[in-house]
């Protein structure tokens, strides 16, 4: 590596603020700049941690425009931390473009271990965990049916992120493309006060959430296609 600075991806709590690590706190206190997906959300976290630092917006609407200036600062030796609203930056959150630019410019990139929603959901699902595929958010419109058709043949456990407003639609489409008897787990509000796990077939889960409209952050873990 060159004598440039470093980009540090810092996971932040997805619910319980005690999930922040001591190392993450120390990094946020020591860096020259903190990039935040939503400065209002991150300001509350920094206040809780008693860290008095200015936050710089870095999100999907401005990241293309700011990358060159950030790379320039890093090449001059700056230590920059990136945080998202919750979880690990660049995982279904902004971050990939800047990481790629750093790699292309021989700038060191480090990611601290920490909070993410997909691993706790997978671990408690009761579905096979030795091999899995993370799909994140399905395309909302274009390409959605094509992707579901492809995933219908996937034998590994599949992990999705989904909005509460589209959960029932997703479960109904899983029943259509994967079969109504495919088992799944819906994990809602992981690490928060109202954390909930519901297990059943995709059809049973669709019926439940049709009668009980969900709120909050959602991870769906779906079993893969049986070899039988």
Image: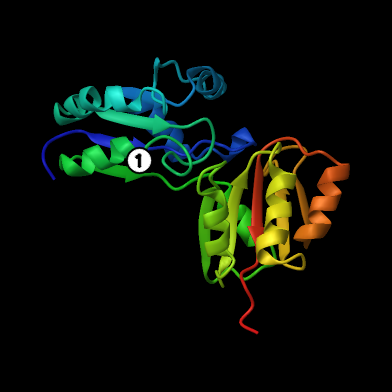
| Residue 193, image x, y percentages | 75, 37
Q: Residue at x 40, y 28 (%)?
A: 28
| Residue 158, image x, y percentages | 58, 61
Q: Residue at x 29, y 40 (%)?
A: 99
Q: Is residue 128 above or below residue 5?
A: below
| Local secondary structure at mark 1 | helix
The residue positioned farthest toward the right in the image shown:
211
Q: Is residue 38 above or below residue 86?
A: above
Residue 124 showing in the rendered view? no
Residue 23 showing in the rendered view? yes
Q: Nearer the viewer, residue 91 or 49?
A: 91
Quadrant where the C terminus is found in the figure: bottom right
Q: Is residue 52 above or below residue 122?
A: above
Looking at the image, residue 104 sits to the left or right of residue 210; the answer is left
| Residue 58, image x, y percentages | 39, 24
Q: Nearer the viewer, residue 137 or 21?
A: 137
Instruction: Write down the residue under mark 1.
Output: 96
Give the color scheme: rainbow, by chain, secondary structure or one colour. Answer: rainbow
Q: Residue at x 54, y 71 (%)?
A: 130
Q: Residue at x 50, y 40 (%)?
A: 21
Near mark 1 (Cα within 10 A), the count class, few <14, some 14-19 or many ≥20, is some
Quadrant where the N terminus is found in the figure: top left
Looking at the image, residue 31 sits to the left or right of residue 139; the answer is left
Q: Quadrant of residue 162?
A: top right
| Residue 151, image x, y percentages | 55, 63
Q: Quadrant of residue 67?
A: top left
Looking at the image, residue 115 sits to the left or right of residue 34; the answer is right
């Amino acid at each position: 590596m060159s004598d440039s600075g470093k980009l540090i991806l810092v996971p932040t709590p997805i619910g319980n603020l005690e999930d922040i690590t001591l190392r993450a706190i120390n990094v946020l206190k020591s860096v020259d700049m903190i990039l935040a997906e939503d400065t209002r959300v991150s300001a509350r976290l920094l206040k809780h941690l008693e860290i008095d630092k200015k936050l710089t917006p870095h999100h999907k609407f401005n990241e293309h425009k700011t990358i060159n200036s950030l790379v320039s600062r890093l090449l001059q030796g700056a230590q920059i931390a990136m945080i998202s609203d919750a979880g690990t930056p660049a995982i279904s959150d902004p971050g990939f473009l800047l990481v790629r630019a750093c790699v292309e410019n021989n700038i060191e990139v480090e990611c601290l271990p920490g909070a993410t929603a997909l691993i706790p959901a997978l671990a408690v699902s009761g579905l096979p965990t030795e091999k899995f595929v993370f799909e994140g958010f399905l395309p909302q419109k274009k390409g959605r049916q094509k992707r579901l058709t492809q995933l219908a043949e996937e034998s590994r456990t599949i992990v999705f992120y989904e909005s509460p407003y589209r959960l029932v639609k997703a479960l109904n489409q899983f029943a259509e493309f994967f079969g109504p008897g495919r088992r799944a787990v819906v994990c809602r509000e992981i690490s928060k006060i109202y954390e909930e796990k519901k297990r059943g077939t995709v059809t049973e889960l669709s019926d439940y959430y049709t009668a009980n409209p969900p709120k909050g952050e959602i991870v769906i873990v779906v079993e893969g296609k049986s070899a039988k």
